[in-house]
Image: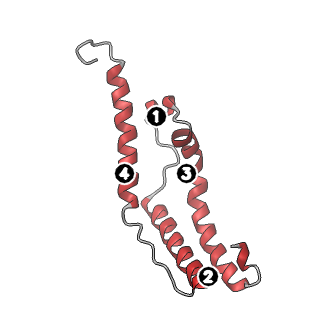
Amino acid sequence: MNDFASDPETYKQLDEQHQRMKKLRNKILPARHKLAAHADRETIRDGKPLGAASWQEWDDFWSALADFVRLLNQKKLGKPFEIDASNVRGDGEKFLKALKQSSHFEKLLNSEDAAVR
């Protein structure tokens, strides 16, 4: 974005999209640090949602990202670049499912019932 400081209109447009993306980032960053970056087992075992965001918030984030990338490419390369983030929701769901399965596995593994272990 700093490359467009001499083009105030483009800078403003990019910054608007950046601010939209930051809203979700600020909301989920603590959870990311706790789960993805540090693999905090106690947090995973608790199974309590951290940094939960609504689908509307996620949709706004991806829309802002698409607008940001489109404008950035238009200004830098002379043509827009359309990103397709249609799989993101699926990837996110797979990640959450894996975390839940890990939590269930730990419970079974540490069960007092020898047959379950």
Q: Which mark is residue 76?
A: 2
- Mark 4, secondary structure of its residue: helix
Question: Mark 3 — residue?
Answer: 28
Residue sitting at x 49%, y 62%: 57
Tell whether 109 sits left or right of 51.
left
Mark earlier in primary sequence (3, 1): 3
- Nearer to us in this view, 117 or 28: 117
Tell whether 69 sits left or right of 100.
right
- Mark 1, secondary structure of its residue: helix
Q: Amino acid at mark 2?
A: Lys
Query: Residue 26 occupies which quadrant of the picture?
Result: bottom right
- Mark 3, secondary structure of its residue: helix
Q: Which mark is residue 106?
A: none
Q: Which mark is residue 44?
A: 1
Query: Picture coordinates of residue 32 (x, y %)?
Result: 54, 46
Q: Are marks 4 and 3 in contact (CB under 8 Å)?
A: no
Q: Amino acid at mark 3?
A: Ile
Mark earlier in primary sequence (2, 3): 3
Q: Residue pushed farthest right?
A: 6
> The N terminus lies in which quarter of the figure?
bottom right
Residue sitting at x 57%, y 53%: 27
Mark earlier in primary sequence (2, 1): 1
CA–CA distance in space, label 2 to label 3 = 30 Å
